[in-house]
Amino acid sequence: MSRLWILPVLGLLSVAAFACSSSEDLPSTTATISSSPTVSQTSTAPTPAASVPPDWLTYTHPTAGFSFRYPPDWSLQEYPSGSQARVASFDLSTWTGPNYPAGGILLDFGRKPSSPGSPQPRPSDATDATLGTLPGWTRRPPDAGEGPGAKSVYYVAEQGEYTYYLAAAFDLADADESIVQMIASTFTVGN
């Protein structure tokens, strides 16, 4: 019974693998994580995120060129050798997993090359959505019992030759899911 948490974790990983079908783009346990990610504080919020508090930080990935804003008390990890970044409502430097703290939210952002002439497959249960200003789709898999990742939501959008994604997972108790929508609304892609 105490090992039932592994089923939702495997479900989250399989959906993340679906959203990022190239395994070289996925963060791994051996990825180099920057201890000083590129973070700036700005008072200029992207247009779709007018309701985002002015004290939120802005993160810009150094090679993938995407940006998003997040609360100043959240933790950020950068994967500079890939095209991903991770932000969480808890301290990622001390998190040993797999369980999230009460109310915990974990977000993985990334970019992968799109297949020429073949857009990212859209699941039949996905709905139209935007990731920042990029049109795309969102999907909320059925809650998968107990444990980390048992409650999740995904955003996928394509621009040019890339597919961008946000995979969010929540602690089942007390997680404020509306903050994920606010963060997703701040997503932008540079030139």
Image: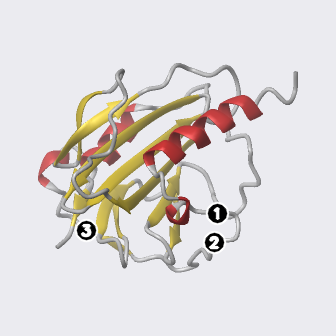
Quadrant placement of the N terminus: top right
Nearest the camera: 132 or 115? 115
The residue drawn where x is 63% and y is 57% is 91
Nearest the camera: 4 or 91? 4
In the image, what residue type sits under mark 2? Ala
Q: Which of marks 3 and 1 is nearer the N terminus?
A: 1
Q: Are there few (<14), some (14-19), or many (20+) residues within 10 Å of tag 3? A: few
Quadrant placement of the C terminus: bottom left
The residue drawn where x is 28% and y is 35% is 137
* Cα gap from disc 3 to disc 2, whole angstroms: 29 Å
Residue 46 visible from this viewpoint: yes
Secondary structure of the residue carrying numbered label 2: loop
Depth check, mark 3 against mark 1: the one in front is: 1
Report if the CB atoms under discs 1 and 2 are less than 8 Å apart. Answer: yes
In the image, residue 167 sits, relative to residue 109, either above or below, namely: above
Label at residue 42: 3
